[in-house]
Image (cartoon, helix red, strand yellow):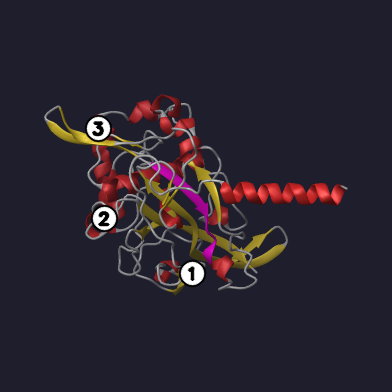
């Protein structure tokens, strides 16, 4: 009797799934666009480099790289190893103004059945004589340990293990919706909400475009603007590329502030991840995957805050390609066996 009952339950569940209305790409405001990321052709494989042993680049690159531990040998407890440095693709991110739009999953748009997370863009408006545009964005964060998943390098303990999975959906996070609530995790924002602090970000803009961002100027997202508030509300949106990269930078910082993301670079990262509540911007590179993958060139995977002048052309297609997708590269220093 129990087996019959179990069979009936399975059949009922199957019928429920079959009769349920599928997720609609037209549900909610705006049509979601995007395409699946091809792990072969849509990846900038040169962004893996440089690869270093100690302070020596054994596989050099023209891309900027933060300082690595000088000494090639390391010790973690009683285990000796070689101090290696490399860049690893670890996360995918959707950045869209349309709620429930999963850009890197082929432009799939889910219909949760209730109104939540509606975002918008508006402008221009005259504020102090300046024309400003306001935009609000959502972020979906995926685990994407590409090198481990594809088994490109076998038996390398420095790689992040796991499989592809959705880790975070901003539509259900109240801190991402409301700038006042966001202040609970970034109360220091009041110290930098002034013209002098924002003007100082020009130095970070120049540094991140020419080489690497200035980690000392943690309140700046380089040429994109301010890291505060740590949410998707952009008060001065210049374009989709600039605004989406700013939002992605803020989101990465937010995860560090909430102790979800940890540090992996430098001497402290040789023996494992460590707490980094104030994110070091030099730890990340952002590569565009949607609407047009950036797979080659000096600025295919620029650091946080780099100018979008070299990425904006061709990165947005009006009406059919305004939802942005990114692959997040993370600097890793590790004491390898």
Residue 72 visible (yes or no): no
Local crowd size for mark 1, using a 10 Å CA cut-off: few (<14), some (14–19), many (≥20): many
Q: Which residue is mark 2?
A: 316
Residue 120 visible (yes or no): yes
How many angstroms separate mark 2 from mark 1 (CA)? 35 Å
- The answer to whether the residue labelled 2 contacts the one labelled 1, judged by CB atoms less than 8 Å apart, is no
175 or 220: which is nearer to us? 175
Q: Is residue 232 above or below residue 272?
A: above
Residues shaded magenta = 138-146
The outermost residue toward the right is: 1
Residue at image coords 40%, 49% = 25
* Label 1 vs 3, first from the N-terminus: 1
Give residue 54's position: percent from left, percent from top: 52, 67
Give residue 144's position: percent from left, percent from top: 52, 58
Local crowd size for mark 2, using a 10 Å CA cut-off: few (<14), some (14–19), many (≥20): some
Q: Secondary structure at mark 1?
A: strand
**Mark 3 or mark 2, which is nearer to you?**
2
Q: Which residue is mark 1?
A: 52
Badge number at residue 196 = 3
């Amino acid at each position: 009797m129990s087996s019959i009952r179990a069979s009936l339950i399975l059949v009922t569940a199957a019928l429920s799934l079959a009769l349920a209305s599928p997720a609609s790409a037209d549900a909610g405001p705006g049509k979601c666009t995007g395409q699946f990321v091809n792990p072969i052709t849509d990846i900038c494989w040169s962004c893996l480099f440089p690869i270093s042993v100690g302070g020596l680049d054994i596989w050099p690159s023209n891309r900027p790289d933060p300082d690595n531990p000088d000494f090639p040998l390391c010790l973690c407890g009683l285990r000796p190893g070689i101090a290696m440095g490399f860049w690893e693709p670890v996360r995918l991110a959707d950045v869209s103004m349309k709620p429930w739009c999963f850009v890197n999953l082929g432009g799939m748009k889910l219909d949760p059945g209730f109104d939540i997370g509606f975002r918008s863009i508006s402008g221009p408006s005259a504020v102090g004589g300046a024309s400003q545009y306001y935009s609000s964005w959502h972020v979906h964060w995926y685990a994407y340990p590409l090198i481990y998943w594809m088994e490109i390098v076998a038996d390398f303990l420095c790689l992040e293990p796991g499989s592809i999975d959705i880790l975070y959906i901003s539509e259900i996070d109240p801190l991402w919706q409301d700038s006042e609530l966001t202040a609970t995790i970034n109360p220091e924002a009041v110290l930098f909400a002034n013209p002098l602090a924002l003007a100082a970000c020009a130095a970070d803009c120049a540094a991140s475009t020419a080489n690497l961002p200035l980690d000392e100027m943690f309140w700046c997202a380089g040429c994109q603007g301010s890291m505060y508030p740590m949410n998707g509300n952009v008060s001065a949106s210049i374009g989709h590329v600039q605004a989406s990269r700013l939002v992605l930078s803020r989101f990465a910082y937010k995860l560090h502030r909430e102790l979800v993301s940890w540090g992996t670079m430098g001497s402290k990262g040789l023996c494992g991840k460590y707490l980094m509540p104030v994110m070091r911007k030099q730890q990340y590179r952002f590569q565009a995957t949607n609407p047009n993958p950036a797979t080659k060139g000096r600025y295919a995977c620029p650091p946080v805050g780099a100018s979008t002048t070299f990425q904006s052309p061709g990165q947005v297609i009006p009406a059919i390609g305004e939802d942005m997708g990114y692959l997040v590269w993370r600097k890793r220093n590790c004491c390898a066996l």
